[in-house]
Amino acid sequence: MPDEKLARAIKARTRRKILRLLIQNEKLSVQEISKKLNITESSASKHLKLLYDLGLVDFKEKFPEKFYSLKIKEIKDFFNVYNKIVKQLK
C-alpha cells in the first residue's frame, strides 16, 4: 500500500535526512550524501536503494558514480507539513 511505503521511507532518521538533502540539492552522489551525513557509503547506498525501490528517488549513472534526485517533488511539501506537526508535538 502506498501509505505503508511512505511510512517505511521516513521511519529511519537517516532516510529522512537523505530526503531533506535531496530537497535542498537537485542531485547528489552517494559519496556526497555519505560525506554530508557522516555515514559510510555502504550505509548511504542501502538507504538510497530502499528509497529508490519505494519510488521516492531516482538516479542517473555517470560512471563510476550514481547521482540521486527526488522522483516525487511534492516530498518537499510533505516535509514542510511534517516539520510543522513535529514542532507542535514538542
Image: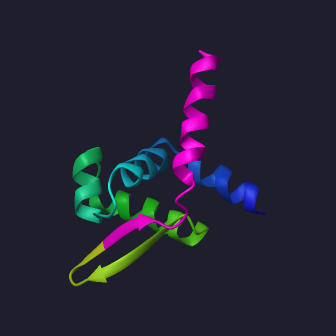
Looking at the image, which residue sits at the far top? Answer: 90
Q: Nearer the viewer, residue 39 or 18?
A: 18
Instruction: From the top left corner, tell me how far across and down residue 85 is, in percent.
Output: 63, 27
Q: Is residue 11 visible?
A: no
**Residue located 32% across and 55% down the image:** 25
Q: Nearer the viewer, residue 79 or 33?
A: 79
Residue 76 highlighted magenta (yes or no): yes
Q: Which residues are magenta?
A: 67-90
**Residue located 74% across and 62% down the image:** 2
**Residue located 29% across and 45% down the image:** 37
Main SS, magenta residues? helix
Instruction: From the top left corner, tell me how far across and down residue 76 is, in percent.
Output: 51, 48
Q: Nearer the viewer, residue 80 or 42?
A: 80
Quadrant holding the C terminus:
top right
Q: Is residue 39 above or below residue 43?
A: above
**Residue located 40% across and 75% down the image:** 59
Instruction: From the top left corner, tell me how far across and down residue 87 is, in percent.
Output: 57, 21
Quadrant holding the N terminus:
bottom right
Looking at the image, which residue sits at the far bottom? Answer: 63
Q: Is residue 79 above or below residue 57?
A: above
Q: Is residue 22 above or below residue 29?
A: above
